[in-house]
Each structure stands twice: as structure tokens, then as C-alpha cells.
Image (spheres, rainbow, N blue to C red):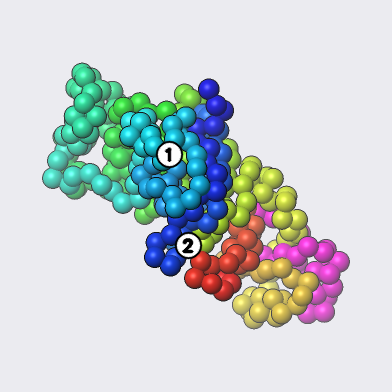
Amino acid sequence: MSDWVIDVQGLHKHFGDKHVVNDLSLQVGRGGIYGFLGPNGSGKTTSIRLMCGLLTPDAGSGSCLGFDIRSQAAEIKRNVGYMTQKFSYWDDLSIRENLDFVARMYQMPNRREVVDRALESLGLQSRAKQLTGSLSGGWKQRLALAACMLHQPKLLLLDEPTAGVDPTARRDFWEELHRLAAQGVSVLVSTHYMDEAERCHQLAYIAYGRLLTKGRASAIIAEQNLLTWQVAGQDLTGLSNQLRARAEIAQTVLFGEMLHVSGHDAAGVEACFAALGINHATPIATSLEDVFIYLMQRSQDNFGGER
């Protein structure tokens, strides 16, 4: 058995004249959480659908759970759980009725036992009879995950599952993902939240249809060789504009009452600070968010031209 649950090479997909996925090659290992990051419109959803056989690539090849993504899409669908970005269950059915309907679609024997197990696993027993339309975003999220897990898939594909969910529900959801990964379930999850990215075992970052980098968070940060300072003071917006005009400065990013300033040469950055009379600059560790903003600013959009 391959070490990869997903192994794709050279995937391309066009919609009209827009090149949505451009030469994507990616390997996802078994039993871990793989974060798939990128801004809205970057091609994450299309890439996920290509990798699980829901869409056919214009070019490229690959496998998902050992099945060919072009010729064995039906087998892939039976062995993965796919949670779409948009909640897709029925508001006028209860939680139990929704799960029972999904179990019937999978033609599962002992449906009642399967649904009871799913309700217990995701803490949904007390709300089993509640109409889905009256649920909060966090409870709808739990229902969607329970439905994905009914047929005990080996791979979960989750497309921005925590969008619009409060911080407590997001934390609980990620604890559940780590519990599933510890049980051997492989997870590919797309997100644009940096705190979620830091909870993944491996990461890939896509922008405008192109894969920009992949690996562990620490390796991704290290490979960009960015040095970062935190600057305090008045009129940080004006200061940011002044710094950006300097060749030694790779980027500036406002974080509340602080300004993050990054560059590749410490002496050059500190000379800029001295020239502008900046006395309150403290070296800090470069964050994953600093790196992804840096990558995004240097990426080429798929309509042509740089961001």
C-alpha cells in the first residue's frame, strides 16, 4: 500500500479562459492533517474536487486512496468523506433524519446503530430531534462532519469547514479532527485561518491556481529567509508607506497597534530604521502569516499581472 492517500501530478483545469489550477502536484500522507491554504478564489475548491474525482482535469494524472482520479471516481467517492464549503443538508429535517437519509443513500445496513454512533461521537444526542434549520453554525458543522463520517471513510476532504463559525466551535472542531487523525483517518482541510494552519502536520499554499510552497510550517517559514521586526509608534500607516519605498524592506504588515517589518538583510533593515528615526523596533520570530502575506504579494494572478 502506498504511503500517500493523495498523489497527483501536473493537474490543470480551465473554466473558459481562466486557468484555475495550474500544474498542481501534491502528495498527502496517511493518518495526518494536511492543510491546504490560500486566499478566496485561489483554486482550493477546484483542486480538492480534481483530487477526489469529482472533476476531471484537463491534463495531469494521479490517485486518491489508490484509485485513479480519472477512471475510478466512483470508488473514490465510496471511500472519502467530503464536507463542502456550503452547508448542504436539509433544514426541514431533524439532525437524526438528516443522518438517516445519508445512511440510506450509502445503503448502509443497521442504519439506526450507525446513526446512534455518529450522534454520540459528535455530541449530538441531546439535539437529535432538533430541526437543522434552527441550528447555529457550530452545530451545523458538527452535523456535516457526522454525515461525512457515517460510512467510516479513510480520507476526509474538508473545504473551509469553519468559515463563519465562532472561535469556540472552531477550537472544538479542530480537537475532533486531531482525534480522528490519531485514529488513522487522513484529513485534507482547506482554510485561510493562520491559527488553523499552525495546527496541521503538513501544509500546502496555493495562490491563483499555482502551488507556491509545501511542507511543515517551520520549514516553510525558514525557506523564505525573512527577518522580522515589530515596530511601535505613532502614524504606523504613514511609517509603513515610507518603509515600503525602501529597497531593503521586503514587506510591512499592520497588526493592531504594531507594525511588522520584514527584510532579508538585518543591517539594511536597521539602516532604514535609523534613517527614518525609528527607535522602537524589536526583532521577533517571523510568523506563518508574515510568510504567507509575503508569498501572496509576489504571486501572479490567473487573469495576468501581479497582485
Percent from the top left, x then y, of residue 197? Answer: 54, 47
Percent from the top left, x then y, of residue 145? Answer: 34, 37
Sequence-first tag of 2 and 1: 2
- Quarter of the image for residue 233 reads bottom right
Q: What's the residue at 35%, 26% (across, down)?
A: 152
Instruction: Tell me, for residue 69, which label it has, or none.
Output: 1
Q: What's the residue at 31%, 51% (across, down)?
A: 86
Percent from the top left, x then y, of residue 248? Answer: 78, 71
| 120 relative to 295, above or below | above
The kind of secondary structure element at disc 2 is: strand
Report how far apart the C-alphas of labels 2 and 1 lie in the structure: 20 Å
| 57 relative to 188, above or below | below
Residue bearing mark 2: 19
Per the image, is 66 magenta?
A: no
| 55 relative to 207, above or below | above
Span shown in magenta: 258-287
Q: What's the residue at 29%, 35% (across, down)?
A: 147
